[in-house]
Amino acid sequence: TRFQQQCPQVDITLITQPTRQLTEGVLTAALDAALVCLPPGADGQPACPAELAFPPVFYETLMLVRPQTPGPLRFAAFASGCSYRALGD
């Protein structure tokens, strides 16, 4: 890509993990940065450790996808530490 040609010394690695693990990775310097969905705190603002900056990149609407016909629903749970799971719990 053009970025790789212009910046060959930069190594980018992408991983996917739940929010808690990614946040911990940034706190311990195992990761330089992470894109996460922070759960709301008691004040309604994103719950983020005070040691981290969290400028918003974009806002996302969480939607429930379900059949149109009524009936019992099974919920696909996310891994422990995922902010989406915290919202579902």
Image (cartoon, rainbow, N blue to C red):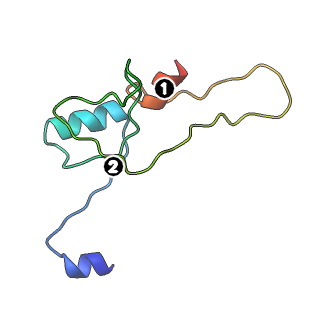
Q: In this view, does 2 lie above or below 42?
A: below
Q: Nearer the viewer, residue 24 or 49?
A: 49
What amino acid type should be assigned to the residue bearing mark 1? Answer: Arg
Q: Residue 72, image x and y in percent?
A: 77, 19
Q: In this view, does 30 lie above or below 76?
A: below
Pointer 1 residue:
85
Q: Which residue is drawn at 25% across and 76% down?
A: 4
Q: Residue 39, image x and y in percent?
A: 41, 29
Pointer 2 residue:
15
- Mark 1, other Cα within 10 Å: few <14 / some 14–19 / many ≥20: some
In what element is the residue under mark 1? helix
Q: Which residue is drawn at 18% across and 49% down?
A: 32
Q: Quadrant of the N terminus?
A: bottom left
Q: Are marks 2 and 1 in contact (CB under 8 Å)?
A: no
Residue situated furthest right in the rendering? 69
In what element is the residue under mark 2? loop
- Mark 2, other Cα within 10 Å: few <14 / some 14–19 / many ≥20: few
